[in-house]
Each structure stands twice: as structure tokens, then as C-alpha cells.
Image: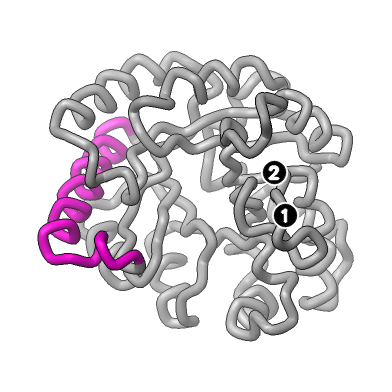
Amino acid sequence: MWIDTHCHLDAREFGGESLRVAADAAARGVSMIVIPTVTVDNFAAVAQLGAAAPNACYALGIHPICVPQASENDLATMRACVAAAMADPNFVAIGEVGLDFFLPHLAEPAMREKQVYFFREQLKIAREYGLPILTHVRKSQDQVLKHVRQIPPAGGIAHAFNGSFQQAQGYIEVGFKLGFGGNLTFTRALQIRRLAEQLPLSSIVMETDAPDIAPQWLHPGVNTPDQVPAIGAVLAELRGVAVEEVRAVTTANARAVLPRLGSVPNGD
């Protein structure tokens, strides 16, 4: 079986067919899909989807791109929702949270400061409840690492990792796994392919970020979680190992970094 550790299964690009998309993934051997939220406004919908799809679970968090519209009330709502969700076996992590200094309006000083504040507050929630995090990191690898070291969560996943080998080692040292997906299928993505080839397989988990980051054979179309096995096959080819090894190790890695996956109904 495979695990897609990051998929926005609730996205409008799926045209209301999210359950069918999840079923298609299950038919391809994707036994679990982790759905992160992006704003408190989609907490309920994602939790419901996690309950409705037998091979899905969810995380709760406020995405840095949504921070400009977020308020202190949203953080209070999130804390209350996390407290309630601890009784839900389909709830596995805090996410998607982090820092995005790539988009110009998010890189302005005031918005950088607000992002940092929201990230640190969500790290505190993760730490309070002993939860791992799913991080969004764009042009902010070192900054995210700094805050994670200061407010350590119970591990996490560096989603769509595209940093340096030194930064990768920093995440590994704080108990994180590194998420790889469709980007590694592009022959021109030299840095990502080197990372995927040379980093310890014990530190890698699979993801799609669907409907985004489509693999080369779907680009520029809509990505789907059923692509995980094919992306895993590319990873196996890059590393010169059997696909079965990549599947087994990355699945074990996902279960290790997201321990609540073991409580998800039908998670096996």
C-alpha cells in the first residue's frame, strides 16, 4: 500500500467528485490520503470528507497564504477544534502551516511578522496536544527550522521539500520526514531529483499535493492521489531500487511520523 501524506482532496478542481477520486486512488493501492486544511472555514468540510472516504484522514491548520485574512478568533477556533478532534480517529496532525515568503504580498515586513505569529501559535497548539505538523515552506526553509527548534512539535513533514542538503539534515535532526511528489518526475528538476536520489530513504514520504504539482505526464493538468504509485516508481528508478522497497519504506516512514494513522478506521 501507499500513503499520500498531502492531498487537498476537498479542492474545487475535483468538481464535487472527491469520494470518487479517493476510491480511484484506493484501487491503485493508495490506502491512505492525508487531507490538510487551509483555513478554519474548511475545517468541517475536510473532517466530514475524512470520515466519508474510507482511505482518508485529515489535519487542521491555517495555511500561511490564508494568514492575511485570518484573525485571533481563527486561532481560538482552531484550538477549540483541535481539542474536540483529539477524540476523532481520523484526525492525525496540525497542518497545513508554515511560512511563505515567495509571494510578494506575503514577503512584506508586516505580513512576514503576521505569518510568523500564526505559525508559532499553531506550533504551540501542536506541542500542547503532542501532534506532528505538515509544513508549507517557500523561501523560508531556515526560518521554519528556527521556529520548529524553538517550539518543537512531535515531528512533522516538510511538505514539497526543495531546500538544500544541509537544510534537509536540519529537518531530519528535529524528527521530520521530507515530502516528495510530482516535482521529481521532471528531468529538469535537477536539485529535487538529486535530493530524492541521495537523501536517506528512511527520511522520505510520498505526497501529491493534488490537485497541484502534477507529475510530468499530467502537467499542466489536475493532479490526483492515484498518481502516488507512479511517482514512487520514478523515485525507485532514481535510487536504483525496487518499487516495492520504496513503497514499504515510505509507508513505514509516514506511519512513524504520523502515529495517529494507526488509529484511522480502515487505515491498513
> Secondary structure beneath disc 1?
loop
Q: Give above or below for 220 relative to 142.
A: above
Q: Magenta span: helix, strand or loop, mainly?
A: helix
On residue 221, the disc is 1
Task: Say if the magenta span includes residue 266.
Answer: no
Q: Is residue 145 visible?
A: no
Percent of width and height locating residue 22: 74, 31
Residue at image x 59%, y 50%? 209
Left or right: residue 18 versus residue 48 is right
Can you say which quadrant of the picture contains the N terminus?
top right
Q: Quadrant of residue 249?
A: bottom right
Percent of width and height locating residue 64: 32, 50
In primary-sequence order, the first of circles 1 and 2 is: 2
- The span shown in magenta is 103-129
Residue at image x 67%, y 34%? 14
Left or right: residue 254 versus residue 94 is right
Residue labelled with disc 2: 3
Number of numbered discs on residues: 2
The kind of residue on which mark 1 rests is Gly
Q: Is residue 99 visible?
A: yes
Q: Give above or below for 225 relative to 90.
A: below
> Secondary structure beneath disc 2?
strand
Q: In front: mark 1 or mark 2?
A: 1
The kind of residue on which mark 2 rests is Ile
Residue at image x 61%, y 77%? 192
Q: Quadrant of residue 187?
A: bottom right
Residue at image x 63%, y 39%? 13
Task: Say if the magenta span includes residue 119.
Answer: yes
Q: Around disc 1, counting alpha carbons within 10 Å, would you say few (fewer than 14), some (14 to 19), or many (20 or more)?
A: few
Left or right: residue 22 versus residue 69 is right
Percent of width and height locating residue 202: 63, 63
Alpha carbon separation for disc pair 1 and 2: 22 Å
